[in-house]
């Protein structure tokens, strides 16, 4: 595997950065320590420009090539935030903060992009400029959108953007991606159901909120199975059912919470509309009232057709063509890099993390073995994409 010597030589140093970040996880936009370390290192590497506070706590470093005649600028993005979980990995570098842990590998993403920045700032073997983008709040609070809304693309003249995420279950030394939709749109919803409370022994004088909410749960499952084209993709999951408190009281209200995942804008619009009809119609059938509160969190992550081959070719240059799956099956999880891909063309890629606990599991830990592979991917992408 063609990992250049200089990148191999950085493996231990980058691993130490990664483990330090792992021990000190921070949530959402509150990534002050992490962003501070990132900015300090980027300055130490000799980046031409380092700007903090983009999208609240995001950081961007600019590295100019030894030639800048092409005028091209590409963005490489890593995420910095952790999750509200208590780690059970038992590793020596496990989280020192109860209730917070890097369970999605963003510590590894940040460390690999920092390592790539160090290499790129030393070698500068490209024509144009690289923007290394470190974003906060990937896990649900739209840090990607915050950086885009803060004018990041215009400010640094970024023309294309690329992102990478580790993938447990995908072998070490492999990559996977596809053109078009690769990760789902994520929407959350809450349903308020109001019947008529009363004595459990006199149900005829009440409207049983629990029964109405139960019918809504069942009816909502008909949206994917009966209303969506079987060749399209959608998930409707109701994950919380809160109502009632006593054995002998029919409650006045109940609340349901859940999430919708879709892979196209049309399917997304359709499911939202249909869910509203099902919720309101089912409640009306029983003489009750139900209100759907629907919140769109992140759009579909769509890899641009023209840019996906650049990412795939860079991966193949590192691990060999047979280890790059160019037609991966989309994932119904979401990724707020979608906001950056909506603003500029580019591509997102999965890097094999091997047979580890899954992301968002309390025993998960980023696999340090893949650090030189990820760094090499970034380096190769820059050196092949930024040529005169
Ligand atoms: Zn995650
Ligand atoms: Zn993640």
Image: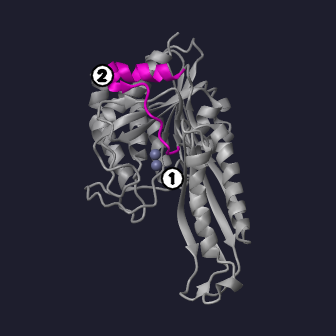
Query: Is residue 217 shown above or below 388?
Result: below
- Residue 252: where, in percent of width, then height? 67, 80
Q: Residue at x 38, y 42 (%)?
A: 108
> How far across and down, in percent of the image, does residue 104 sit?
41, 49
Residue at the image point whose x is 53% and y is 47% from the top: 138
Tell me if residue 150 can be seen.
Answer: no
Question: What is the distance, in whole Å, between disc 2 and disc 1 at their CAs?
Answer: 32 Å
Q: Which residues are magenta?
A: 307-334
Choose the circle earlier in sequence order: 2 or 1.
2
In the depicted structure, whether residue 178 falls above or below residue 296: above
Where residue 3 sits: x, y (%)?
Answer: 30, 23
Residue highlighted by disc 2: 4
Q: Is residue 96 visible?
A: yes
> Within the magenta stretch, is there residue 290?
no
**Of the numbered discs in the image, which one, if any, rests on residue 31?**
1
Q: Residue at x 38, y 34 (%)?
A: 351
> In what element is the residue under mark 1?
loop
219 displayed left or right of 327:
right
């Amino acid at each position: 595997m063609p990992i250049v010597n200089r990148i191999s030589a950085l493996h231990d140093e980058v691993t130490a950065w990664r483990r330090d970040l792992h021990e000190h996880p921070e949530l959402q936009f509150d990534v002050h320590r992490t962003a501070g370390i990132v900015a300090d290192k980027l300055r130490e590497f000799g980046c031409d420009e380092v700007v903090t506070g983009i999208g609240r706590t995001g950081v961007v470093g600019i590295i100019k090539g030894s030639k800048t005649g092409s005028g091209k600028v590409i963005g490489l993005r890593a995420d910095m935030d952790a999750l509200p979980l208590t780690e059970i990995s038992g590793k020596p570098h496990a989280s020192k903060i109860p209730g917070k842990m890097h369970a999605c590998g963003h510590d590894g993403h940040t460390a690999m992009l920092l390592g790539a920045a160090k290499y790129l700032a030393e070698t500068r073997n490209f024509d144009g400029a690289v923007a290394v983008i470190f974003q906060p709040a990937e896990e649900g609070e739209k840090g990607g959108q915050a950086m885009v809304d803060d004018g990041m693309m215009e400010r640094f003249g970024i023309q294309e953007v690329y992102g990478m995420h580790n993938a447990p279950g995908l072998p070490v030394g492999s990559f996977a991606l596809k053109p078009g939709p690769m990760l789902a749109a994520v929407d959350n919803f809450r349903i308020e159901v109001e019947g008529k409370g009363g004595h459990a022994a006199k149900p005829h004088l009440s409207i049983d909120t629990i029964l109405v909410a139960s019918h809504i749960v069942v009816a909502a499952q008909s949206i994917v199975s009966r209303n969506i084209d079987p060749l399209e993709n959608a998930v409707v999951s109701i994950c919380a059912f809160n109502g009632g408190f006593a054995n002998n009281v029919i409650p006045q209200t109940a609340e349901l919470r859940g999430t919708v995942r879709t892979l196209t804008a049309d399917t997304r619009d359709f499911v939202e509309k249909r869910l509203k009809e099902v919720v309101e119609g089912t409640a009306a059938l029983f003489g009750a009232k139900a209100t759907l509160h629907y919140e769109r969190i992140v759009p579909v992550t769509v890899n641009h057709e023209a840019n996906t081959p650049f990412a795939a070719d860079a991966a193949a240059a590192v691990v060999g063509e047979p280890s790059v799956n160019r037609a991966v099956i989309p994932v119904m999880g979401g990724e707020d890099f979608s906001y950056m891909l909506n603003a500029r063309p580019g591509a997102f890629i999965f890097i094999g993390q091997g047979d580890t606990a899954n992301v968002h599991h309390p025993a998960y830990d980023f696999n340090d073995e893949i650090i030189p592979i990820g760094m090499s991917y970034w380096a190769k992408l820059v050196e092949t994409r930024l040529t005169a």
